[in-house]
Image (tube, rainbow, N blue to C red):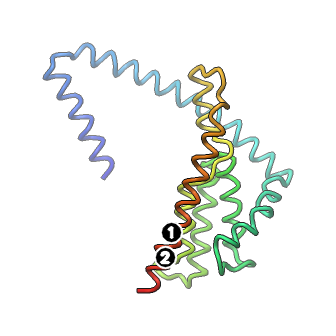
Amino acid sequence: MMNRIFTLLMLCGISCGVLCQSGEEMTSVLLESGSDAITLCLALTGGMCVWGGLLKVAEASGVTDLLARLLAPIVCLIFRGIDRHGKALPLITMNFAANALGLGNAATPLGLAAIRALKEENGDSDTASDHMILFTVINTASLTLFPSTVLTLRSEYGSMHPLSILPAVWLCSTIVLVFLIILTRTLCAVRSVR
C-alpha cells in the first residue's frame, strides 16, 4: 500500500513539474536532494553506531540489566497480573530501557520478542491480550530520556545547544505516556465489560 502511495506522490510531483515547465529546476532539485539524503544517512549511521556501541558496552557491563531490574517493579505495576517469572517481563523491561535511552533500533527486536512471549502467555490466541495492547501503546509512545537520533540531527544541522530540548522531550513524553496508559486501561476495561 505504501509503495503505491509513494509512487502516486512521485508521479504527481513529476507531472506538476512538467506541466509548469520547470524541468531544469526539478532535475537540479532531485540531484541535490539525493546528495543531501546520502549525507543525512551517513550522519545518522554514525550516530547510531556510537549509541549502539554504547548500548553494547552497557550490556556487557551489566548497566542495562541493572536498569531492567530497576524498571521491573514499575512494569509489574503497569502490567497487573503479568507472570513475574515468565519470559515477557525481562524482555519488556529491556525494551523500555532501550527506548528510554533513545535506542529504538535496539528496542525493536526486544519489542517483537516481548510480543511473542506475551502471546505465548495468552495461550497463543489470535486475539491480542490487554497486556499486548498496553505494551504496544507504551512502546509506541515510549518515554525517551535521551533521544539520540534527534540529538544527532540537531548536531548535524548546526545546533549550538543540541541538548536544550531535553526538558521539553521529558515533559511531553511523560504526559503522553501517562495519558495513553490511562486511556488504554480504560478502553480495555470497557472492552472486558462487554
Residue 171 x, y percent position in the rendering: 62, 46
Instruction: Please name the amino acid that badge 1 sits on.
Output: Thr
Residue 192 x, y percent position in the rendering: 47, 84
Q: Describe the element under mark 1 as helix, strand or loop.
A: helix
The residue drawn where x is 69% and y is 72% is: 77
Query: 176 and 81: which one is in front?
Result: 176
Residue 106 x, y percent position in the rendering: 65, 51
The residue drawn where x is 64% and y is 73% is: 79
39 in relation to 151, above or below: above
Q: Which dot marks residue 11?
A: none
Q: Describe the element under mark 2 as helix, strand or loop.
A: helix
Residue 164 x, y percent position in the rendering: 65, 31
* Residue that lies at the very extreme toward the right in this rendered image: 61
The 10 Å Cα crowd at callout 2, few under 14, some 14 to 19, many 20 or more, is some
Q: Which residue is mark 2?
A: 188
57 in relation to 110, above or below: above
* Circles 2, 1 touching at the beta carbon (< 8 Å): yes
The residue drawn where x is 63% and y is 41% is: 147
Query: 174 and 98: which one is in front?
Result: 174
Instruction: Give the CA separation, mark 2 to mark 1.
Output: 6 Å
Number of labels in the image equals 2
Q: Examine the image and state in which quarter residue 66 appears.
A: bottom right
The residue drawn where x is 80% and y is 62% is: 70
Instruction: Please name the amino acid that badge 2 sits on.
Output: Cys
The 10 Å Cα crowd at callout 1, few under 14, some 14 to 19, many 20 or more, is some
Q: Which dot marks residue 184?
A: 1
Image quadrant occupied by the C terminus: bottom left
Answer left or right for 151 relative to 187: right
